[in-house]
Amino acid sequence: MPNYRRPWCPGGTWFFTVTCQHRYNDPPLIHNIDALRDSIHIVKRRHPFHIDAMVVLPDHLHAIWTLPPGDTDFATRWSLIKAGFARRIPRQDTGTSTDASERRTPSQRRRRERGVWQRRFWDHLIRDEEDYRRHMDYIHFNPVKHGLVARVADWPFSSFHRAVREGLYPLDWAADLDEEFEAGE
């Protein structure tokens, strides 16, 4: 395992990718969106942060958060969100396991963890305005990229709709990108 060190930037803005452990027949995130929202809301009350952007896809999510000044602890927030979500959803039958409900690693069984999430997540410290804009666009375009919808505005589990209300994007944003993406450019 590499000797990975996360940069610590108190009050920083971060991009995250958080992924389910397995591909499910009934993907847990969008089918349990209220449980995810509740988990996030509870954590935000106890450990405040600002969600700049977020998109929830069937088996993963992307987010940009800004932490309060002097705060660097996004890992605890993600841990609490993931645990809270896992407690709120029913166990799933993956159809491929001898375990009657979820595939869990021996480590997860020892720790009494659910087999919902990958243990780790991807994080990236946003460096500047251009980096921020690129990651915002990436988040909002992701449902189109994955073939879930034809237009960005058609995906309901995205902060894109809030960004349109705030005047950050026009409702038809990325219509030309949709065509470029389909053409493989």
Image: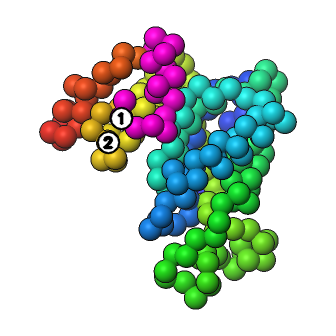
User: How many callouts does the rendering have?
Assistant: 2
- Quarter placement of the C terminus: top left
Residue at (78, 45) in percent of width and height: 76
> Which amino acid type is shown beneath numbered disc 2?
Val
Q: Are marks 1 and 2 in contact (CB under 8 Å)?
A: yes
Residue carrying label 2: 149
Residue at (36, 35) in percent of width and height: 154
Asked if one can make out residue 86 in the rendered structure from this viewpoint, the answer is yes
> Which amino acid type is shown beneath numbered disc 1?
Asp
From the top left corner, tell me how far across and down residue 32 is, in percent.
58, 53
CA gap between label 1 and label 2 equals 6 Å
Number of other residues with Cα within 10 Å of mark 1, as a class: few under 14, some 14 to 19, many 20 or more: some
Q: Which residues are magenta?
A: 153-168
Residue at (69, 80) in percent of width and height: 106
Residue at (51, 29) in percent of width and height: 159
Residue 62 or residue 41, whichever sits in front: 41
Q: Secondary structure at mark 1?
A: helix
From the top left corner, tell me how far across and down residue 146 is, in percent.
34, 47
Q: Quadrant of residue 83?
A: bottom right
Precedes in sequence: disc 1 or disc 2? 2
Residue 154 is labelled as 1
From the top left corner, tell me how far across and down residue 107 is, in percent.
72, 75
Is 154 included in the stretch rendered in magenta? yes
Asked if one can make out residue 3 in the rendered structure from this viewpoint, the answer is no
Q: Residue furthest top?
A: 167
